[in-house]
C-alpha cells in the first residue's frame, strides 16, 4: 500500500505551533515510508478565511523546510485543493446521501434547537439533536419553505451502533452512536461542515493515514459513519497529543 497523508489547515490566521507539529509528523511519516504528502486548504469558514492567511501558512511551512508532493502551489491529479473550489463535488455526494436515506433536510430554528438543548441538559442528558425533522411529510416541508425557512442537511445517525476506532496512537477507542445525535453536514447557505467535507476530500484523495491532534478524536466517529454510508474506505487514524502550557492549555 502506498502511504498518502495530508496537512489541511484552515487559513484563519498564522500557522500555530500545534499545526506546525502536525504538519511535521505527516511530512516525516510520508518521507520515511516513501509516500506522498498533500497540502490542502480547508477554507469553508468564509467569514474568517483569507488568502493572506493561506499565503502566511505556506510561507511558514517553507521556512520550516517542509515540502509537499501534491496540493496547493504544486498541483496534482486530485485537485482543486481548496474546499471552496470543491463545492460541486460535495453537492454530488449530498444528493446521494439524501436519495439513499442517510441524510435529510432539517428546518428547525435556532430557538427550537436551543430549547431542546436546555431540556436535555436539565434531564442530565448529553445535548444532541433528537431527529425532529427525520420524517417530515412533503406537506410539512412545503409549509416550512413557505415560511421562508432555509434547511440544513443532517446526517441520519444509525441507532444502537458501536463505533470502534483502532487508533494508531491511542489503541482501541469506542463511541456509541446513540450519544451523537443527527449532525449537520451542510449548512443553510450550502457550505459543507468540517466533518463532512474532510471525509469527501480524504476519500477522493486516497489518504491512507489521518495524523492529527487529539482534539479531533471526538470528530472521528461522525466521520467514520459518513465513510460507511458512502461506501468509502476508512483510513487509519492517529491522534497525537497536544502541546500544552503549564496551565494545561493549548
Image: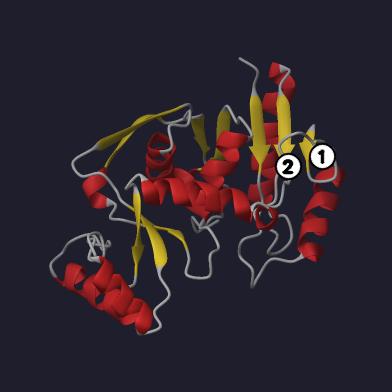
Q: Position of residue 11 (x, y in %)?
A: 70, 59
Spatial distance from mark 2 to mark 1, Cα to Cα? 7 Å
Which secondary structure lies at badge 1? loop
Q: Residues within 10 Å of mark 1 (few under 14, many from 20)?
A: some
Q: Is the N terminus in the top left, top right, bottom left or bottom right quadrant?
A: top right
Residue at x 63% of width, y 49% of height: 18
- Return the residue at label 2: 79
In this rendering, does residue 114 appear at all? no
Residue nearer the viewer, 158 or 217: 158
Q: Are marks 2 and 1 in contact (CB under 8 Å)?
A: yes
How far from the left and from the top, in percent, is residue 142? 32, 75
Q: Residue at x 18, y 41 (%)?
A: 160
Q: Which residue bears the numbered disc 1?
A: 75
Q: Is residue 18 above or below residue 234?
A: below
Q: Secondary structure at mark 2?
A: loop
Question: Which numbered dot is residue 118?
Answer: none
Q: Residue at x 27, y 62 (%)?
A: 129
Give left or right: position of 10 versus 219: right
Q: Position of residue 243 (x, y in %)?
A: 58, 47
CA neighbours of label 2 inside 10 A, class few (<14), some (14 to 19), many (20+): some
From where the camera sits, is residue 147 visible?
A: yes
Q: Residue furthest left?
A: 123
User: Which image quarter is the C terminus in?
Assistant: bottom right
For residue 141, side relative to residue 227 (left or right): left
Q: Quadrant of residue 14?
A: bottom right
Residue drawn at x 53%, y 37% is 240
Amino acid at each position: 500500500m502506498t502511504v498518502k497523508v495530508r496537512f489541511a489547515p484552515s487559513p484563519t490566521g498564522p500557522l500555530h505551533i500545534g499545526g506546525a507539529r502536525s504538519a511535521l509528523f505527516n511530512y516525516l511519516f510520508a518521507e520515511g515510508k516513501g509516500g506522498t504528502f498533500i497540502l490542502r486548504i480547508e477554507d469553508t469558514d468564509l467569514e474568517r478565511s483569507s488568502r493572506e492567511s493561506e499565503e502566511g501558512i505556506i510561507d511558514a511551512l517553507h521556512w520550516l523546510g517542509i515540502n509537499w508532493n501534491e496540493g496547493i502551489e504544486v498541483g496534482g491529479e486530485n485537485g482543486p485543493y481548496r474546499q471552496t473550489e470543491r463545492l460541486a463535488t460535495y453537492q454530488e455526494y449530498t444528493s446521494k446521501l439524501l436519495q439513499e436515506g442517510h441524510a435529510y433536510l432539517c428546518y428547525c430554528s435556532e430557538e427550537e434547537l436551543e430549547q431542546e438543548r436546555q431540556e436535555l441538559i436539565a434531564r442530565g442528558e448529553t445535548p444532541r439533536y433528537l431527529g425532529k425533522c427525520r420524517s417530515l411529510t412533503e406537506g410539512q416541508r412545503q409549509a416550512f419553505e413557505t415560511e421562508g425557512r432555509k434547511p440544513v442537511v443532517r446526517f441520519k445517525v444509525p441507532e444502537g451502533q458501536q463505533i470502534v476506532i483502532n487508533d494508531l496512537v491511542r489503541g482501541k477507542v469506542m463511541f456509541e452512536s446513540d450519544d451523537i445525535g443527527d449532525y449537520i453536514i451542510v449548512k443553510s447557505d450550502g457550505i459543507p461542515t468540517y466533518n463532512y467535507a474532510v471525509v469527501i476530500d480524504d476519500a477522493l484523495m486516497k489518504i491512507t493515514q489521518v495524523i492529527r491532534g487529539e482534539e479531533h478524536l471526538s470528530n472521528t466517529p461522525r466521520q467514520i459513519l459518513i465513510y460507511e454510508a458512502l461506501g468509502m474506505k476508512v483510513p487509519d487514524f492517529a491522534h497525537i497529543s497536544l502541546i500544552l502550557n503549564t496551565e494545561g492549555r493549548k
